[in-house]
Each structure stands twice: as C-alpha cells, then as structure tokens.
Image (cartoon, coloured by chain):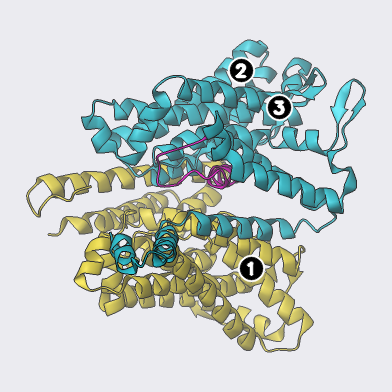
Amino acid sequence: MNARTYPLLATIAIFLIAYAVCYTQYPTMLSTRVIGNLLTDNAYLGIVAVGMTVVILSGGIDLSVGSVIAFSGVFIAVILRDTGLHPLIVFAALLFISTAFGAAMGGLIHSLAMPAFIVTLAGMFLARGAGYMLTIDSVPIDHPFYEAIDDAYWLMPGRGRFTLIGGIMLLSVLVGMIVAHRTRFGASVFALGGGEQTARLMGVKTGRTTVLIYAFSGFMAGLSGIVFSIYTGSGYPLATVGTELTAIAAVVIGGTLLTGGAGYVFGTLVGVMTMGLIQTYIVFDGSLSSWWTKIVIGALLLFFIVLQKGILHISQTGGARPAESR
Amino acid sequence: MSRTLLRIAPQAITLVVLVALISVVFPGFLDISISDGRLVGPAIDILKRGASVALLAVGMTLVIATRGIDLSVGAIIAICGAIAAWGITNDYSLGTTLMMAVAAGLLAGLWNGTLVAVIGIQPIVATLILMTAGRGVAQLITEGRILTFSNDQFAYLGSGDLFGIPVPALLWPVTGVLFAIAMRRTALGLLIEAVGINRRASALAGINATLLLIAVYMASGFCAALAGIITTADIRGADANNAGLWLELDAILAVVIGGNSLMGGRFSIAASLLGAMIIQTIDTGILLAGFPSEYNLVIKAGLVIAILILQSPRLGATWTYWRYALFSRQRGGATQAVREGQE
C-alpha cells in the first residue's frame, strides 16, 4: 500500500472515531438533520477548500480567498440593490471577475518569480479593499430568486434538509476530484508540487499551469462567495476574515502535504467535516466554550503535520524510493 | 555607516515623499505642540500607534532573514496581553507580571523554533498552528471575557510619557537599536544571514543552525510579548479576540517594504522599522487627508505590488540583460551581452 494514502486514511479514521464518540454521548448526532446542517453550514468553506487543495497540491498558497468571498457577497448585494439584473447574470459576472482575479495573481506569481504567499497577500488586501470601496455597510439581499433558492431543499428521511448549497459543495468536491486526479491539468499540478524544476524538465508548461491553478482557486472562491451570500442573505465587506487560514487548516487536516505534490481532494472534504463536527459537538455540549474549537483544530493540525513528516521520513529512509533532496 | 544610509535610502525617500504628499493635502501634518507637558501632533501619533507593528517587525526581520516566517505573532500578542492582564488583576507585582508575559512570549517562540528547527516543519505551517490555537489559549486565560484592570503603573507603559514622548514611541526605537547592535557589533547578524542563504552549507561551516533558528523565533516571540504588553497597557484591558489581530501581516509587509527578501539572507532592521512607519503614515495620512479609510487597503495592495515588481528576481535579470545590451552596443559587443545574460 502506498505510504501517501496514510494521511487520508488517518483523516477518515479520525473523523469516524470522532463521530462515534459524539454519537455515544448524543445519539441525535447521527440524525439526518445534523448531517444536513453539517453540509449546509460548511458549504462555503468546503467549496473554497477545494480550490485551496489544488493550490496547495501545486506547492503554492492562496491567502486571498477569504477577501474574495467577502468581495463576492458585497458585489452581489450591491448590484442586486442598485440594478434590476437577474441574480444569475450577476453570478456569471462575479465568477468571471474572481476567476480573472485569480488568473492575474497566478500570472504575477509566475512572471515575477515571487513567493505565492506575498503576491496573494497583496490580492487579499486588494479584494477586501475593493469590497470596502463598494460599501462599508452590511447590505441585505431581498430578491425573489434568493427566497426560491432558500426553499430549494430535499427533505431527507428524518426531516433533515439537504439544501441546494450543500449539494453545490458536494458537486464542487466531485469536480475538484476529477480535475485534480483525472485530468492532464491535474497531473501538471502534482508535477509542479513535486518541484518546479523537475516539472519544467518533464515538459509541464509551468506558466500556464500556475495561471490556471490560481484561476481555479479564484473561481472556487467566487462560487463560495455566492454560496455564502445565499447562506447569510447579505453582503458584508468584513465577513469571512481569516477563512483562508481555516481553509488551509482543513486541507492539511485532510491529509494534503503542505509542501505540495501529494494529497487528495476527498480528504479536504473530510477535513472540513471534521472541523464542522468539532463545532457541532461544542454546540451540543453547551458548556464548552467556542475557543476550544481553535485549540482542538490547532492540535489536529499539529498531529497531521507531524504524521506527514513521519511518513515522509519513513518513505525516504525505507528505500521504497530514492531519497528526496529536501 | 554610509552603506547603511545607502541601504535604507529607498525607504527613507518613500517616507519623506509620503509625508510631503500628506502635508500638501493636510498642511498641519508635521505640527508638534506641547500640551500638559507632552508633545502632541500627528507625527507623534504615528510614532506611538506604529509601535506594535514596529516591534513585531524587528523580530520578523530576523525570522525572515533565516528564510522563515512567523504567522503567530498576532496570537502571541493576545496570549501575552492576556497573561499580563491576568497577572495584574490577580495582584502580582508589576515586575512579576511583565516577567510572566515576556516568559510566555519566549516560550511561544521556543515552541515555534522547535517545530521549525528540530522537527523540520516549514515555518509557515509550523507557526500557523500557534496562530490558530494561540487565540484559543488566550481566551482560556481571560475565560472569554475582556479582562480590564486599573493599575496606573502598568497603564503608564501604554499611555504614559517620558520627557514628553509617549512610552511606546520610545520603546520600539530602543528595542530596534539594541537588536541592531547585537546583530551588527557581533557576528550574530552574519550567522543569521548565512543560515538564511543556505542552512545546510552554514551547518557544514560549523554554525549551530538549529540553535540559531530557535533563538530567532524566540526573539520574535519576545518582540511580540513587548507589543502585547503595550497594547494591553494602552487600552487597560486584554481582548483575546482582537488584540494584535492581523498584525502579523502588517509586520511581514513592513519587513518586505524594508526591502528584505522573503528568500532570506541580507537583512536590515532599520529599513524594516522605516517600513513599519511607512505603513502607519499611510494609515494615519489617509484619515487626516480626508480620504475614506476604505481606500487604505487598496493603497496598501498597490504598494505591495509595486515593491514586488522592484524586488522580483526574474525582472531583475531581464533588467541586467537590457542594461548590458544597451551599454555594450556602443562597443559593438551585443552577442557577448546575450551570452552574459544567459549565464
């Protein structure tokens, strides 16, 4: 068995064990209501984490996504308030903007040969600043189309609601899995994560791939912004501060190697669900304070990073393949 | 000395131009008056408000010089602020309280440094752990409330003044100078640069890279503790949720504006401090000039991109190539320039 699947298996095992522990204390945790809410509440995070997974697989990082989500919400809310356009047209325009924004950052990263960290940091300031310039208030969205989406859910047995945005999240994960593991682009992403020099020597078009990676992340951030605006029914430029770090944490807990080159998009979904589960447990318990979420997530992060480090060490010294020069 | 001046010239010129620009829009920008025995004026305000970022920038410069990054400083500010407020409300003496806060900062730095240097985790990930968990720890200390206190001695550190100058405005230059002396009057700065350029080579050359890396993260934790103390003293309370929030990004920005490469190597603390002042001048200047503060972030983003383009290694190589090509055309050596450009 490939050592690289261990983190994914560990993630799944931890999620199942955690769910079992929750179930023994609160049997209602297994109801479709809780599961439905788990999907709905974490829909925007799951979508953006899929984009982040692809970025991290390539060895990069995208700090701008939280700001892009906030900008998306404000953009949708302001356009719907000031014009009579149909939301679907606004969505299309927004996805175009966010994808172009991501592509521009990818282009800068490649053409300037600068770390993704600092380029996307500038993107983070820019997107949030653009949101502020549109409005500094929380703008409510009251469009009949939004009410229709709110009512669009499938009542699962047990009165749990499988909402449209939860469905969009699962669909994004599916698309992300296909893109990352079943396409030529995905192979290029993994190659880039293994090392830019080697990727270039193998014939990967590094510039094009970098632009596409960040464009994909920008698209997912825009989609996540749409879902977030449906979820909250408003646009607020101060929303989702720090979501990029939550998304990165979800990707790492999902078993993706932060140095790039190894990981699974499906793991990210499990990572998002694990983080959601911790929050749900704290809500169920009632006496635990919300700061425990942060501490537990920090501990999980540490566990997975050390686990990956150990696996990398074993696979380097075990002779399974030639040692990497890291 | 002249080399130092040359090194910080771009930052100093930027700062002067910024101040001149703001003075045009807001004529009283450089006015300093004396009221109640203390200096007042926008410039003094900038020196005081920029203290946290400037302190963080000192430690961050060293971390970035080793090719690392410390995302956790904002969370360390929250932890140290919480400990300081907890200590003072539980009737510990001021000295003990400050010692506890600084010790917490050093401990946090030791944690980060161990993860980076001993376990070998990438700095951005290693410090992300404390960044996520740190605020939870701080809230554990304050029990989720905003701990307030009314100790005038402690509050003096944040809002008092010495010789008419606010204490925070004195603290960061002193810290910066002490660190700069420690770096440049000994071989320490050189060793840090060596580790940043190539850790393995420096280790082979006999430098104890592991110890040095841990020390650098502890220095960053120490600076963050100082920033946490003045933040807490200034507002007479510890807010675990908001103290130092996103200051790590401002500190990194200050270091980058200071012309220090994120790839490690050569560093200048003075330039980073100027970078911190540039950020604070923009923040204050935008408000004074009557622009809506919404423009603040966009201007910052524009600034970062401009600096990135100036720093870019790839564009730098292109520029060198063209300069060669242009110069040697007079001597008819264009082919030689092409060859040199490719090397």
**In this view of the protein, which residue sits in the foreground, A166 or A245?**
A245
- Chain on which label 3 sits: B
Quadrant the N terminus of chain B occupies: top right
A239 in the magenta segment: no
> Chain A: what color?
yellow
Q: Residue at the spot x=64%, y=84% of the render?
A: A90
Q: Position of residue B233 (x, y in %)?
A: 71, 26
Q: Chain of mark 2?
A: B
Q: On the picture, is A129 further left or further right than B162?
A: left
The answer to whether any part of residue A37 appears in the image is no
Residue beneath disc 3 = B168
The amino acid pointed to by label 1 is Phe
Identity, as a three-letter code, of the amino acid under mark 3: Pro
Q: Chain of mark 1?
A: A
Tally of numbered discs: 3
Chain identifier of the cyan chain: B
Check chain identity for marks 1 and 3: say if they share one: no
Q: Which residue is mark 1?
A: A71
Q: Are marks 2 and 3 on the same chain?
A: yes
Q: CA distance from mark 2 to mark 1?
A: 41 Å
Which residues make up the magenta segment? B247-269
Badges 2 and 1, same chain: no
Question: Which marked residue is nearer to the observer: mark 1 or mark 3?
Answer: 3
Q: Are marks 1 and 3 in contact (CB under 8 Å)?
A: no
Gap between marks 1 and 3 measured at Cα: 35 Å
Q: Amino acid at mark 2?
A: Leu
Residue annotated with mark 2: B98
